[in-house]
Amino acid sequence: QVHLVESGGGLVQAGGSLRLSCVSSGDRFFFHLNEIEWYRQAPGKQRDLVASVPAGGSATYDHSVSGRFTASRDNTRTWTDLQMDSLKPEDTGNYICCLRSYCGRGTQVTVSS
């Protein structure tokens, strides 16, 4: 069993920054071996993948956040961060981290114009 908890969301003005974190508890090896995904879900819209962090190798990003977001993971402590810079109002949404079929409940990010 894996349990994921996100934190770090909040209200920020356009151009600002936030750093989200996602802590995984449970099977440490499951965390080590699998890709972590960060999704954004805006009200009334589908969940969109914004960043993926593989077990080994570099993170990949949706074109809408590339160059502004940086995803990283710390396997020794089973957590992942999403650094978000130059935020835009369209970045607003509930940010959810997932590990295979396990997902947290998300943390809300609101960017005002």
Image (cartoon, helix red, strand yellow):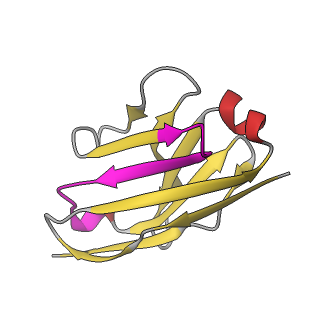
Q: In the rendered image of this protein, does residue 76 appear above or below residue 40?
A: above
Residue 36 sits in quarter: top right
Task: Count up the numbered dots.
Answer: 0
Q: Which x, y percent locates residue 8?
A: 43, 68
Residue 58 sits in quarter: top left
Q: Which residue appears at 80% of the width and 43% of the height?
A: 27
Q: Which residue appears at 64% of the width and 68% of the height?
A: 105
Q: In the rendered image of this protein, does residue 69 appear above or below residue 17?
A: above
- Residue 81 seen by the camera: yes
The reply, left or right, for residue 29 in relation to residue 71 is: right
Q: Which x, y percent locates residue 33?
A: 69, 28
Q: Nearer the viewer, residue 32 or 95?
A: 32
Residue 91 forms part of the magenta stretch: no
The reply, left or right, for residue 14 in relation to residue 92 is: left
Which range is magenta?
Answer: 73-90
Q: Nearer the viewer, residue 69 or 75?
A: 75
Q: Nearer the viewer, residue 2 or 42?
A: 2
Q: In the rendered image of this protein, does residue 73 appear above or below residue 92?
A: above
Q: Nearer the viewer, residue 45 or 91?
A: 91
